[in-house]
Image (cartoon, rainbow, N blue to C red):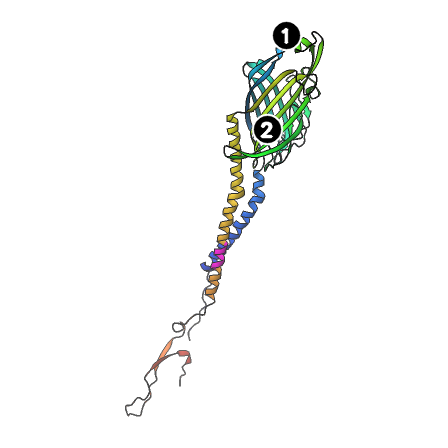
Amino acid sequence: MAKSSSAPASTQSPKRVLPSILIGLGVFLLVVAILIPLYTVGRLEKTPLDLEITTVATGTGSVLDSRSLSAGAARVDENVPLVSQRFVTTEEPSDSDRITVQAGSTLRRTDRQGDTGLLTAVVDRVTLDRVSSMPVDPVGSIQSQADQPATEVPHTGLQYKFPFDAQKQTYPFFDTVARQSFDMTFVEETQIEGVTVYHYTQTIPAQDLSKVVPSPTNKLALPASTWGVEGGDQPITMTRFYENTRDIFVEPTTGVIVKGQEDVHQYYARRAGTPEVDVIRAPISFDDNTVEYQLGRARDGMDRIALIGRTVPIVAGVVGLISLVLGLLLLLRGGRGQGRPATATGPAPDAPTQAYDNRVDDGGRGHDWTTDRTEEIPRTNLRKD
C-alpha cells in the first residue's frame, strides 16, 4: 500500500500579506492626519524662546532744546531727524508656557552726537504667555531714568506681539510712557507686499506724566518769559503731558507686528489738551528694513504652521485613504478566489493505476461484439482471486 504523507505548513500567502500591510498603513496615515492639527500645530503656535529682535523707526518733527530752558528762553527746534530703536531679548524666567522679554528702547535726534542727542531711554521687562502674548506673573518693571532703579509696574495688555490667530476685535495694548493699557481697535484688513495684515489703531488721550513718574522734569516752575507766555518774571508752573495715536499692522496667523507707526506728542501746558511748549511732536514709523525683517518672520511662521497644520495632514489623509481602499479591494478579491472549487485534471498523485482488457471473447468466432477499451482503475479497487 502507498504510504500517506502530510504536506509541510506553508507561510501566509503574499496575496493576504499585501492587503494587510496596505490597510494598516492606511489606518495609520488617517490617524496621523487627524492628530497632527490637534497636537503638533499647538507646539508651533508659541513665541520662540530665542528672541533677539531689533526694530528701527524714523521720523522728523519738533523737539524742545532742553538747554534753552536753563538759558532763560524755551526754544523748539523744527524739522529734527529722529530715530527710535528697540532691542528685544529673552530673559528668565522662561519655559514651555511663558516667556520673559526685555526691551531696551531709545529715541534720539540724529543731528546731535552722543548723549546730547538722546531724548528718552526706557528698559521694559515683562513675562508673557507664549500663546496669547498677554502678561502673566510676575509683575513687570520699567526703568526710565538711568540714575534710578527699575520700578515694578503691572502690565495689563499686549505689547511686542499679538496672539496667534489674531482676531478682528479690540485688544488692550500697553503703553510704556503712560504705564497703562488703552484699547487697540481693529480698523481693516489690508495687505503689505502681498501679505494679509490686520490694521489696528489706538488713541491715547492727554496723560499727566507728573502723576506717572515723579521726575522733576515732568512739572516745572519757571518765569513766564522763559515759557514764552505773558507774565514776565512771574513763576508759571507747567506740567508735561503726553498724547499719542498708534497704528500697527499685524499678520494674524503668527501675531507678528509687521509695521508700526506713532504720532507722538509731548508738551508742557497748564491744562491738558492745551499745548503751550512742545517737548516732542513727530510721526515715527518702522523703516523699510524693519518692515522687511518683520515680514520675513511672519512668512517663516506662516509656512511652518501651514506645512504641519494643513499640507502634511492633507497628504497623509489622501495617501492613507488610497492605501486603505486598495488594501480592502485586494483582500476582497483574494477572498473570492479562495472560494472557487478545484478542478481535477489527472489521477490522484498517490493512487497508482493498472490497465485491464475489457474485451469479450465470442467463443472463437472471431467477432468482438463489444467496443475495445482500456480503463485505468486504482489498484486499491482490484481484488485478487
Q: In which quarter of the image is residue 152?
A: top right
Q: Where is residue 268 in the image (x, y as percent from the top left)?
A: 66, 16
Q: Mark 1 points at which residue?
A: 71
Foreground residue, 14 or 339?
A: 339
**On residue 247, which mark appears?**
2
Residue at image coords 49%, 47%: 315
Q: Position of residue 24 (x, y in %)?
A: 51, 53
Q: Is mark 1 on a helix, strand or loop?
A: helix
Type of amino acid at the residue the image marks with label 2:
Asp
Q: Where is residue 167 in the image (x, y as percent from the top left)?
A: 60, 37
Could you tell whether 119 is left or right of 316 in the image? right
Query: Which part of the image, by quadrant, shows the C terminus?
Result: bottom left
Q: Position of residue 156 (x, y in %)?
A: 67, 30
Query: Which part of the image, by quadrant, shows the N terminus?
Result: bottom left
Residue at image coords 56%, 48%: 34
Classify 126 as above or below 351. above
Q: In which quarter of the image is residue 172?
A: top right
Residue range of the region highlighted in magenta in the rendering: 324-330
**Residues packed near mark 2 inside 10 Å, few (<14), some (14 to 19) or many (20 plus):** many
